[in-house]
Image: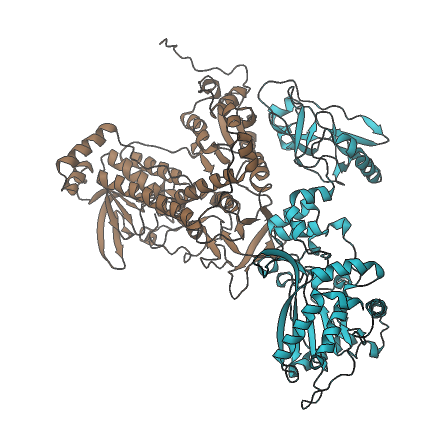
Chain colours: A cyan, B brown
Amino acid sequence: MSNLLHTSFISTTKTPSLYRPTTVLPQPHFKKPTKIQAKIREIFMPALSSTMTEGKIVSWVKSEGDKLSKGESVVVVESDKADMDVETFYDGYLAAIMVDEGGVAAVGSAIGLLAETEDEIQMAKDKASSNVGSSSAAAASPPAPVEAVVSDSAPKAIESAPKAKSVTGSSVHPASEGGKRIVASPYAKKLAKELKVDLSSVVGSGPMGRIVAKDVEAAAATGAVIDKAKPNVSVKPDAGPKVELGSVVPFTAMQAAVSRNMVESLAVPTFRVGYTISTDALDALYKKIKSKGVTMTAMLAKATALALAAHPVVNSSCRDGKSFTYNSSINIAVAVAIDGGLITPVLPDADKVDIYTLSRKWKELVDKARAKQLQPHEYTTGTFTLSNLGMFGVDRFDAILPPGTGAIMAVGASQPTIVGTKDGRIGMKNQMQVNVTADHRVIYGADLASFLQTLAKIIEDPKDLTF
Amino acid sequence: MLLSFHSHSSSPPKLHRSPELRFSALRRHSLVFSPLKQSHYRKFISTFSEKKKSTTLASVSNNGSPTMSFDYDLVIIGAGVGGHGAALHAVEKGLKTAIIEGDVIGGTCVNRGCVPSKALLAVSSRMRELQNEHHLKALGLQVSAASYDRQGVADHANNLASKIRNNLTNSMKALGVDILTGVGTILGPQKVKFGGVGLSDNVITAKDIIIATGSVPFVPKGIEVDGKTVITSDHALKLEFIPEWIAIVGSGYIGLEFSDVYTALGSEVTFIEALDQLMPGFDPEISKLAQRVLINPRKIDYHTGVFATKITPARNGHPVIIELTDAKSKELKDTLEVDAALIATGRAPFTKGLGLENISVATQRGFIPVDERMQVIDEKGNLVPHVYCIGDANGKLMLAHAASAQGISVVEQVSGKDHVLNHLSIPAACFTHPEISMVGLTEPQAKEKAEKEGFSISIAKTSFKANTKALAENEAEGLAKLIYRPDNGEILGVHIFGLHAADLIHEASNAIALGTRIQDIKLAVHAHPTLSEVLDELFKSAKLSDDVSSPARQPIAV
């Protein structure tokens, strides 16, 4: 609104305002910012009229860290009469915003901090955070801790959010070109800004996989909040170096092997059978034994191995197109995404090894895989493969059968679901979907069906896992 | 108004979002009933009731008598709001008048513009109110969740359009204006043909001809309109589906009004604007405030300084894909994938099949060139006798009521009284919630003029926040702004953003049209409490030089 200052009308008055109220009132004025510390000044809620006792922050024209020069508009304040631009009297940096947009502050209370140099911004921020508590009595809506905002605005999202699933990783949907771009609806973007959610960590559930408002709310509820996001140890596909667009990059040895195997898999006549399994009991058990170093992956591998023991045909494979090869041991391979590729470390004899040992073994394998130190027998001897994308929020998918094995199971996220129970009631259960791809030359539909039934029984009553 | 319906076959002129095109739009339809004098009207009624079965006779008796050797005194090509306004005024002036229409009576405004959009905006206004719990609570109201039936909303818009169309048709029939069906083509001086597919061609002669063929939505090249997922206002007004996410190309009147409708009905909106800021046609201060109220708090985001250079409709499971190109560097900047795109980049004149070549007239960027009296100019720069062009087809000010005003001005001239229309006194309005309205110059325009002509300007502003009626409605967000000359009290421009702004502007536009100065109008009385007091306060707050004097008035004691 500095252009207004060139009009004769405004320039004759020294109104620092956007809209001059026509009711004749004493000249709008600022309280002079007092010097409170070296060169950090407070920006006060100005008294814009004689009747004004508090003002609402309509919008911050500047953001934290912006350079300000004397006379520039910093914030728009709504009084009882009009909205006015508030200008700074000093050069410097807007170090901290203490009352957010939409917040109300009493006349004379601090709404932001101005630092004279860039170095002092941090100092001012620290001061702001220590100050918020004391000044928030006046400021009805101080920069609320994110938790408070979240629990306030999205209590339902918290309930319905998948438990123990930190939603990290790039948004994987067709619209994003493999996570290079984020496709989010306008409202989702606004919410993400408001709830301080990093959109690159949100999985879209809208049309064409775009991120919509409820995804952001869910992400905020599950803690995909920027500064709280925990690095996911087991899977982090987006950790790789940035790719240069438009370039052609040859496969690494590992990627070439993947490619070869994938093409080879086309020669196998596969089919798929899916099953929905309740995980409430498994989740409860996991909670109980998590402290002993047990991982969910180990538990799933163990459950699968126990089910395979009862259905040896599902653990078989067809090597020559003429015969069944019944494997002597149950070795569960688990697909792991690593830097620039994919590898399947194997948990040998998963049906016989106890869950704690299995968990330790798994950790050792993952560490080795990351360090690229896996020996061939540690990743080529699987008889059955598990692939789990549940941690991304994927609820179901379809896996390609690795050559030389009979079946692979795709595991989706466990999500709270409303289900009808046998006694005619409606209840809430955590459910996950699994989908097995198998070689139909040796494994038939009924085989997979009864295997899945057994697996469901084990997972839904997991007491056998800890033996 | 349109001679045919090929809205997308006309080749777009090279007018990529030129500022004047923004003035197109969904404007208020102004004329429903005739401006006839009461006595005149009563005379007609009595004639009519006496000879109920002989409408033709009754009509003729009211439609003047044709000048010797011409079939008609005046033939108007195009029965939109402009043509309609001209026809009614012509009858009042005693001219024998015919109007040619190849599509539907009422033209864009009534059928595909201002009228149906007002129906949709009326719905969106109520939805907004019912959804705003905070607002309702402040009024002490409790309403349970509001929802809508899409077809019901669409029907309301359609019903309104047909009702207004009937009103328009009846008002012309009642006065005896001959409505001729078909595409009108000028064959030569004072000679017009009308007809078309399935119609026989007729040739009529007229002393004067008014071209009022209007405009069609302008679709920039590269954009493929399929009428379903990539649409213009023509399709959007039918409200056949409400997309979850719609991109609106252009943030002028049309785009803004539709953003209001779509967001109220639950859509999310992305604006694509070629210029560097949204709402470029408005006074900068108004657009800044409007952005704060109409854009920021709603489910709307925007890209400015970009052209939508390529838009592909949704097909084969793909969404609508929009390529955004930087307006300056011409580099591909971004790609959007949305559920629908509304093209609101303005309107292009519709002059196809008019036979302009027969009177040696060449269009300029599609528009028919006219002088300040709306008389058509030929390719050599000479005035074409007896041919006038009004409304969107001349591009002077693409508003329905401007077309009508131009038509009335032309009728004044052809009936022997010189008249020049002051376009600066024509108000414009955008029917968002709250509304935006304006008349005269914007602040930058006024500054430029002041600099050129060597006078100074001043600005006065009032807020709706201090207005009792606005506060009672709990809708006190708003601003009125006056740009004036302090040395003589002349009103240069008035801009209003706030509750009922579109209705409030007329005090200012009338003042400009009649040359009323601030020193006079500030003494006028306004009923209390009304929104009109916002303007009252605005005029009173203007600070004039001490030597400004009111023309002496004889005080009258009553």
| Residue sitting nearer the eye, A268 or B180 | A268
Q: In which quarter of the image is residue B94?
A: top left
Q: Answer left or right for B247 relative to B416.
A: right
Expressed as whole percent of the image width and height from the top left, the position of residue B73 reads: 23, 41
Q: Quadrant of the C terminus of chain B?
A: top left
Q: Can residue A339 be seen in this view?
A: no
Expressed as whole percent of the image width and height from the top left, the position of residue A320 reads: 70, 89
Residue sitting at x 47%, y 42%: B124
Q: Quadrant of residue A119?
A: top right
| Residue sitting nearer the eye, A29 or B84 | A29
When the figure is inspected, residue B302 is found, relative to residue B49, above or below; the finding is below
Expressed as whole percent of the image width and height from the top left, the position of residue B205 reads: 22, 47
In the displayed orientation, state which residue is furthest to the top: B557
Q: Can residue A64 be seen in this view?
A: yes
Label count reads 0
When the figure is inspected, residue A449 is found, relative to residue A391, above or below; the finding is below
When the figure is inspected, residue B192 is found, relative to residue A87, above or below; the finding is below
| Residue sitting nearer the eye, A89 or A30 | A30
In the displayed orientation, state which residue is furthest to the front: A423
| Residue sitting nearer the eye, B192 or B531 | B531
Expressed as whole percent of the image width and height from the top left, the position of residue A196 reads: 71, 47
When the figure is inspected, residue A467 is found, relative to residue A285, above or below; the finding is below
In the displayed orientation, state which residue is furthest to the bottom: A322
Q: Answer left or right for B373 relative to B219.
A: left
Q: Answer left or right for A384 relative to A177.
A: right
Q: Answer left or right for A320 relative to B428.
A: right
